[in-house]
Amino acid sequence: MNTNYIHRLIRLVEESEIESLEVSSWGRKVKITQKLAASSNGHNGSTVVLPTPPPAAAAPPREVAESQKAVEPPAQVADNKSNLVEIKSPMVGTFYRAPSPDADPYVSVNERITEGQVVCIVEAMKLMNEIESEVSGRVVELLVENAKPVEFGQVLFRIDPKA
């Protein structure tokens, strides 16, 4: 924004009875605030021009935070999850339950698995990485849908080693 444009905006605010005006152009914002005098005509108050900073780029989007909440366990499992072992994604990638689209899934809920058994694939940079279980037990929860993106450390499965 050039200074002539800003001066015209200041005059506009001074000549009107509005208290503030905010204008944004090309990623820049200018807010002009006028303190109206206590006089009856409402004019001749002091005017303040405040440039407003651009929004912070480091703030995470609200959708991301809300989508992470959607992966929480069901209520009945949450009460009993202290003894469960979590299988987490070791990398960022795409989660696949089966080795190919027409194949059966590696594991299903309530299925018994053994230590070292492949439970899923996480594709990262065109490489298919088989994820193995670190414990034997029963699959209690499957927390990710097939062909959905996963983050590093995101819980994929919960296993009950005592079952």
Image (cartoon, rainbow, N blue to C red):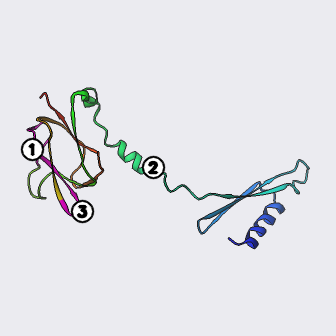
**In terms of secondary structure, where does tag 3 sit?**
loop
Task: Kindly identify the residue that appears in the image at 13 percent across and 53 percent down.
Answer: 98
Task: Kindly identify the residue that appears in the image at 24 percent across and 62 percent down.
Answer: 125
- The amino acid marked with disc number 3 is Met
- The amino acid marked with disc number 1 is Gln
Q: Report the side of 25 relative to 73 (left or right).
A: right
Rendering coords of residue 42 (x, y %)? 87, 53
Q: Is residue 80 above or below residue 24?
A: above
Dot 2: within a 10 Å radius of its alpha carbon, few (fewer than 14), some, or many (20 or more) residues?
few
Asked if the residue under mark 3 is in contact with the one under mark 1, i.e. CB atoms within 8 Å, the reply is: no
Question: How many angstroms separate mark 2 from mark 1 (CA)?
Answer: 37 Å
* Quadrant of the drawing holding the C terminus: top left
Q: Is residue 135 above or below residue 83?
A: below
**In terms of secondary structure, where does tag 2 sit?**
helix
* Residue bearing the label numbered 1: 117
Rendering coords of residue 162 (x, y %)? 13, 27
Task: Kindly identify the residue that appears in the image at 34 percent across and 43 percent down.
Answer: 70
Mark found first going from the N terminus, 2 or 1: 2
Rendering coords of residue 108 (x, y %)? 13, 42
* Residue bearing the label numbered 2: 62
Query: Which residues lie in the magenta part?
Result: 106-127
Question: How many angstroms separate mark 1 from mark 3 (CA)?
Answer: 23 Å
Q: Report the side of 83 relative to 117 (left or right).
A: right
* Residue bearing the label numbered 3: 125
- The amino acid marked with disc number 2 is Arg
Asked if the residue under mark 1 is in contact with the one under mark 2, i.e. CB atoms within 8 Å, the reply is: no
